[in-house]
Image (cartoon, rainbow, N blue to C red):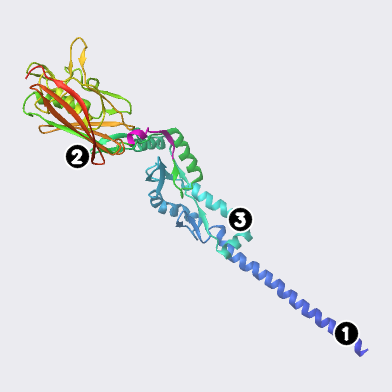
Amino acid sequence: MKEKKNIWYLLNKKGVIVLIIFCFLIIGIFGFFLYSYIIVRPYYSKVLPNTYLGKYSISDVSFDSLNSIVDKYSDKILDEKITLLCNNREYSYSYRQLGLKIDKEKVIRQVIQYQNSLSFFELYDDLVNKEKNSFHYLFSYDEDILEKFLYTLKLQTDVVKKDGYLSIDDNRNLRYVDGIDGFSLDVQKCLSILLESFQTMNFTMPISLVGKVDKAINNEQYKSIDTKVSSFTTTFNPYISRATNLKVALDYIDGAIIMPGEIFSFYKYAGPYNKKGYVFYYEYVGNGVCQIATTVYNAALLGGLEIVKRYPHAAKSPYVPGGLDATVASYSSGWNVDFQFKNTYSYPIYVSAYAIGGEAHIDFWSNKDAMGGKTYSTESVQIGRRGYTTYLNTYQNGVWISREKIATTWYSKD
């Protein structure tokens, strides 16, 4: 009997221990829930910690105070910048400049609705783990104001297409300028893009705007022109009306481009010699343009180019050696006396024609390899009283290699 009594005693003792443990467990669970409730309960009516509207903290603010808090940050938010990308350029504007306004009701509603959607345990987990909650700005906007803004922006973004071209600087040096693509902002498509962006309210990345691109034409042959291959200068009296005719003729041929195999016609550019700009001198309008034709003739010879048409004056010209002149003329019947040369290079030739004081300059520009390392000089030899034979000397890399006859000229009068 004594042994049986001990067994019941032990069983009763274990039961008491289990009961005590169970009681502590119940108390612990109750205590946990009570503690959790105490922690969580305030956040049924105020914002969770570590909560931000954009970069501005709205943590631990009562729901009732959210209106004033959003008001407090509104000016700062509206002054923040948004980046627009357009035609490879960036434009920065504040939300205010786009006509946006903070939609306070939507901002407050999104915060409250988010917290109300969380269960008790989700709220507790958020509090314990200190999760960061971020909300985007929500704006109200007027489509008409946005459209006006885009039309104003269009004045900055639009570019008129400019094809590649050759440019002479103040020192008469030539360079090729690459073309510029044209661009026209598509206001209606951009309006749709902005409105869609305002729906997502994610402005951390630039917003790309669109438009129509008009590709510029870049002439690869023009790009090859990089060297002054020949030049010639004649002098004149700058104080008489004849000088006007020389300058006008220079202006007409300045910038002429002769492609490989093409024939340059002086008359095509500068004639007829009674057109706008030419004045009467001595016997007729345009008197003096022959000097410019002569200057071009000598530049062509020094460039080793093929002379197609060349006619001498009746008398030797005072501004070049005998036999190195070229005359031009035009008549009311349409008949004309022309000077022509052919571009025998594999590259285009650009004619730079200009006057400095009493000097008429003609420069031929082409590629550095156009003449194949050759240079030229002219020579005038008098034969009799009114006759001249002209020669072209050729040099290869500075070494004389040949002398060829250009022409024999006989003048009919002194």
- Under circle 2, the secondary element is loop
Please report whichever mark, 2 or 1, sits nearer to the chain's N-terminal start: 1
Q: Which residue is mark 1?
A: 7
**Are there few (<14), some (14-19), or many (20+) residues within 10 Å of tag 2?**
few
Locate residue 269: give its quadrant.
Answer: top left
**Image quadrant for the C terminus?**
top left
Q: As rendered, which of 260 and 181 lies closer to the eye?
A: 260
Name which residue lies at 10% across and 33% down.
357
Please report whichever mark, 2 or 3, sits nearer to the chain's N-terminal start: 3
Q: Can residue 323 be seen in the rendering of this structure?
A: no
**Image quadrant for the N terminus?**
bottom right
Spatial CA distance of label 3 from label 1 is: 53 Å
Amino acid marked by disc 2: Asn
Q: Which residue is mark 2?
A: 171
Locate residue 29: give its quadrant.
Answer: bottom right
Q: Which residue is mark 3?
A: 118
Spatial CA distance of label 2 from label 1 is: 121 Å
Q: Are marks 2 and 1 in contact (CB under 8 Å)?
A: no
- Under circle 3, the secondary element is loop
Horizontal side of 147 relative to 33 (left or right) equals left
- Under circle 1, the secondary element is helix
Q: As rendered, which of 22 and 374 lies closer to the eye?
A: 374
Amino acid marked by disc 3: Leu
**Picture coordinates of residue 101, whole percent (x, y):** 42, 44
The correct choice, above or below, for 87 with respect to 30 in the image is: above
2 vs 1, front mark:
2
